[in-house]
Amino acid sequence: MAQGREDLIYSLAKSMGMGNAQTAKYTASKYNAETGTIYCNGHVITKATIEQAKAYFTTQYRKLAEKDEEGAKELSAFYEVAMESIGMMLESTAGGSDAASG
Protein backbone atom coordinates (compact mmCIF):
# COMPACT_ATOMS: atom_id res chain seq x y z
CA MET A 1 0.00 0.00 0.00
CA ALA A 2 2.76 2.48 0.91
CA GLN A 3 4.65 1.77 -2.32
CA GLY A 4 1.51 2.49 -4.38
CA ARG A 5 1.04 5.78 -2.55
CA GLU A 6 4.67 6.74 -3.11
CA ASP A 7 4.41 5.90 -6.82
CA LEU A 8 1.28 8.05 -7.07
CA ILE A 9 3.01 11.01 -5.41
CA TYR A 10 5.99 10.76 -7.75
CA SER A 11 3.70 10.39 -10.77
CA LEU A 12 1.77 13.51 -9.76
CA ALA A 13 5.01 15.43 -9.23
CA LYS A 14 6.24 14.37 -12.65
CA SER A 15 2.98 15.38 -14.32
CA MET A 16 3.23 18.81 -12.65
CA GLY A 17 6.59 19.44 -14.28
CA MET A 18 8.78 18.58 -11.32
CA GLY A 19 11.38 17.03 -13.61
CA ASN A 20 12.10 13.36 -13.77
CA ALA A 21 10.74 12.72 -10.28
CA GLN A 22 9.69 9.13 -10.91
CA THR A 23 13.19 7.91 -11.73
CA ALA A 24 14.99 10.33 -9.40
CA LYS A 25 14.04 8.31 -6.34
CA TYR A 26 15.87 5.30 -7.76
CA THR A 27 18.97 7.01 -9.14
CA ALA A 28 22.12 7.91 -7.25
CA SER A 29 23.28 11.48 -6.98
CA LYS A 30 25.97 12.46 -9.44
CA TYR A 31 28.62 15.15 -9.42
CA ASN A 32 29.86 16.53 -12.73
CA ALA A 33 33.43 17.67 -12.05
CA GLU A 34 33.65 19.46 -15.41
CA THR A 35 30.78 21.84 -14.64
CA GLY A 36 30.87 21.65 -10.84
CA THR A 37 27.19 20.65 -10.79
CA ILE A 38 25.43 18.08 -8.59
CA TYR A 39 22.42 16.17 -9.92
CA CYS A 40 20.42 14.97 -6.93
CA ASN A 41 16.82 13.76 -6.53
CA GLY A 42 15.73 15.42 -9.76
CA HIS A 43 17.40 18.74 -8.83
CA VAL A 44 20.33 20.50 -10.41
CA ILE A 45 22.59 22.13 -7.84
CA THR A 46 24.89 24.67 -9.44
CA LYS A 47 28.52 25.33 -8.60
CA ALA A 48 27.58 28.74 -7.18
CA THR A 49 25.09 27.14 -4.77
CA ILE A 50 27.65 24.52 -3.78
CA GLU A 51 30.20 27.25 -3.04
CA GLN A 52 27.60 29.14 -0.96
CA ALA A 53 26.90 25.95 0.99
CA LYS A 54 30.62 25.50 1.68
CA ALA A 55 30.87 29.09 2.93
CA TYR A 56 27.84 28.54 5.19
CA PHE A 57 29.20 25.32 6.68
CA THR A 58 32.61 26.92 7.18
CA THR A 59 31.07 29.86 9.03
CA GLN A 60 28.95 27.60 11.21
CA TYR A 61 31.93 25.34 11.94
CA ARG A 62 34.06 28.28 13.05
CA LYS A 63 31.31 29.64 15.32
CA LEU A 64 30.69 26.31 17.03
CA ALA A 65 34.32 25.17 17.23
CA GLU A 66 35.06 28.14 19.51
CA LYS A 67 32.42 27.13 22.06
CA ASP A 68 33.35 24.96 25.00
CA GLU A 69 30.16 22.89 25.02
CA GLU A 70 29.96 19.22 24.19
CA GLY A 71 26.91 19.63 21.92
CA ALA A 72 28.55 22.48 20.05
CA LYS A 73 31.74 20.47 19.54
CA GLU A 74 29.77 17.53 18.15
CA LEU A 75 27.76 19.75 15.82
CA SER A 76 30.92 21.55 14.68
CA ALA A 77 32.32 18.15 13.66
CA PHE A 78 29.28 17.62 11.41
CA TYR A 79 29.80 21.03 9.82
CA GLU A 80 33.48 20.21 9.36
CA VAL A 81 32.60 17.01 7.50
CA ALA A 82 30.23 18.92 5.21
CA MET A 83 32.67 21.73 4.43
CA GLU A 84 35.57 19.34 3.82
CA SER A 85 33.45 17.12 1.57
CA ILE A 86 32.36 20.08 -0.48
CA GLY A 87 35.95 21.28 -0.58
CA MET A 88 37.08 17.93 -2.00
CA MET A 89 34.44 18.16 -4.73
CA LEU A 90 35.46 21.69 -5.63
CA GLU A 91 39.10 20.71 -5.61
CA SER A 92 38.44 17.93 -8.11
CA THR A 93 36.75 20.51 -10.36
CA ALA A 94 39.57 23.01 -10.06
CA GLY A 95 42.23 20.39 -10.61
CA GLY A 96 43.71 20.80 -7.15
CA SER A 97 43.79 24.61 -6.98
CA ASP A 98 42.99 26.49 -3.81
CA ALA A 99 39.24 26.45 -4.56
CA ALA A 100 38.83 24.06 -1.65
CA SER A 101 40.62 26.15 0.94
CA GLY A 102 38.39 27.50 3.65
Image (tube, rainbow, N blue to C red):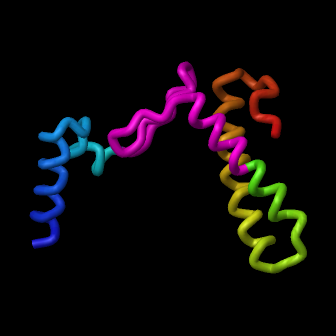
Foreground: 69 or 25? 69
Q: Quadrant of the C terminus?
A: top right
Taking the image as shown, residue 72 lies to the left or right of residue 36, namely: right
Span highlighted in magenta in the image: 28-57
Name the image quarter holding residue 66: bottom right
Instruction: Identify the residue at image location x=70%, y=55%.
Output: 81
Foreground: 15 or 30? 15
Instruction: Identify the residue at image location x=42%, y=36%.
Output: 39
User: Which x, y percent locates residue 12?
Assistant: 13, 49
As drawn, 70 above or below 75: below
As drawn, 82 above or below 89: below
Taking the image as shown, residue 96 lies to the left or right of residue 93, namely: right
Instruction: Identify the residue at image location x=67%, y=46%.
Output: 85
User: Which x, y percent locates residue 9?
Assistant: 16, 56
**For residue 29: magenta?**
yes
User: Which x, y percent locates residue 86?
Assistant: 65, 42
User: Which x, y percent locates residue 2?
Assistant: 15, 71
